[in-house]
Amino acid sequence: MVGITCGALIVSQKFVKPSVTVDPPETTTKAVTTTKETTTEEDTEEEPAPTGEKVELTTSENGEIVVTAVKKTEKKETTTKPQVFKYTGGALPYFSWDEAKKLSPNYFGESVFIGDSISVRLQMYGGLPGATYLCYGSYGSCNALSGVIKANIWNCIPAGKKRVYIMLGMNDLNRVGVAGAASNMAQLCSLIEQNNPGVLIYIQSMTPIIAAKDGTNGRILNNANIRLYNQMLSGVAASHGWYFVDVASVMYDDRGYLKDEYCSDPGSMGMHFTSAGCSVWCWYLMNHCYDPSWAVRTVTVDYVMADGSTAPKSQVVKDLKNGQSYSVQSPEVRGYTPDKATVSGTMGTEDITVTVKYTKDPTYKLTITYIKTDGSTAAKTYVQKDLLKGDTYSVVSPTVDGFTPDKATVSGTVGKSDVNIKVTYKANPTTTKKPSTTTTTKKPTTTTTTTTTTTTTTETTTEQANEP
């Protein structure tokens, strides 16, 4: 993100101002430290006539900006060799014109341009749609403050305008010196801001002089002092919260002078612009549009533990636009309570950092005692520590032979105090064993005994004597 800087600082302090690769002029620079210088010779400016040139802007494959000047003649049209601007600074652009139109369709219509005859050429070119111009020949911060030309210009800003782009200096350096001109610019911009509440100030850098005319426009009006003046303007913008738009950065040739093809008055001051120069000027402004309401911002939520223990990792929400709401839920950490359960709000024009502090929650103890009805201990006491409010518990009562607990399971939810529960064991009823009466009906056993009667027959043999 680059292009428009808040003084020496980049907008949002995150962007890198683009720059062109240039070599410094060969002349030796002597810084002017006087705050006021008067001359009897009035600066004169020659109003340049429109050149009638047309230009085309394209972008090369490697991101370089190509300006093609097309010259028209009565007989034929010829195209000059494209001039390539190669940037060595940050990426271009910050907000392109396509992006700006979506964010503010009437961006330049809401803008006023204050300037001298250099800006009159921009007005004649007409490349900024809807822009209002308060630009005058021989104008400068000196005569603006003194009322010589367009007195009280700070009261001439039309109602409803949001931005004032201002470029002055060519008619001031010889009169009051570099420091004096920068001081006058600060005073003039302050008056514009004070008399137009809410208006944004964009100080444009003063553009350079062609090499052939460098040092021919008075003792102080030269490229070296223009560079010094622009550095001071950047500081002025930074100290007041204004924006510094470095238009000059795309106007230099490879030696640090205004490109000859951009100069419409090489025979006089060597400072005014051709259509090609105005085209590049418009391109730069249109591709470096900025309004703080467009800026994307970041919300960072940091977490700390009151007892110094390890905190959750910070949460970062990026790419928030002005007016966009955000909500960041603080992570849950067991045993701790954040002082902000949710960080929420509406994005403004600055990054936001919020710190959420976690404090340790009180802990509670669950104690379950097991006793018999006679007061003796039935089982070892159960103790559970470091319970938090809202924790649930469920403990099965131990088995004790011959006894039955009045609570088979102890369960519940921890409140704001320790939990003490008693489980009473009652002896199981004693059962007396009665003699078991068993009636056994014995059937008579009939034993059949077979008695074998052995009849012994005694055979008596009677021997009779046979008588002969």
Image (cartoon, rainbow, N blue to C red):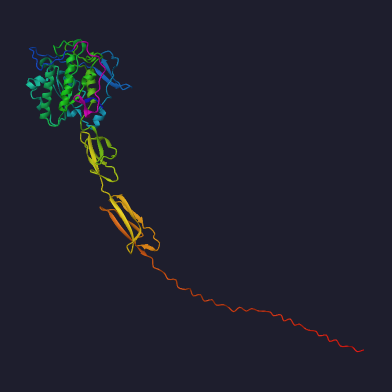
In the rendered view, would you say 77 is above or below 130? above
Q: Main secondary structure of the magenta part?
A: loop
Q: Is residue 17 magenta?
A: yes
The spot of residue 109 in percent (x, y) is 18, 28
Q: Would residue 397 be found to the left or right of residue 309 on screen?
A: right
Question: Residue at the location (76% across, 82% down)?
Answer: 456
Task: Using the rendered view, name the quadrant where residue 428 is placed.
Answer: bottom left
Q: Is residue 28 visible?
A: yes
First to last magenta residue range: 5-28
The spot of residue 111 in percent (x, y) is 17, 27
Please name whichever residue, 408 or 152, is drawn nearer the observer in this view of the structure. Answer: 408
The spot of residue 200 in percent (x, y) is 16, 29
Task: Using the rendered view, name the quadrant where residue 102 is placed.
Answer: top left
Name the image quarter holding the C terminus: bottom right
In the rendered view, would you say 313 is above or below 154? below
Query: How many numbered markers are drawn?
Result: 0
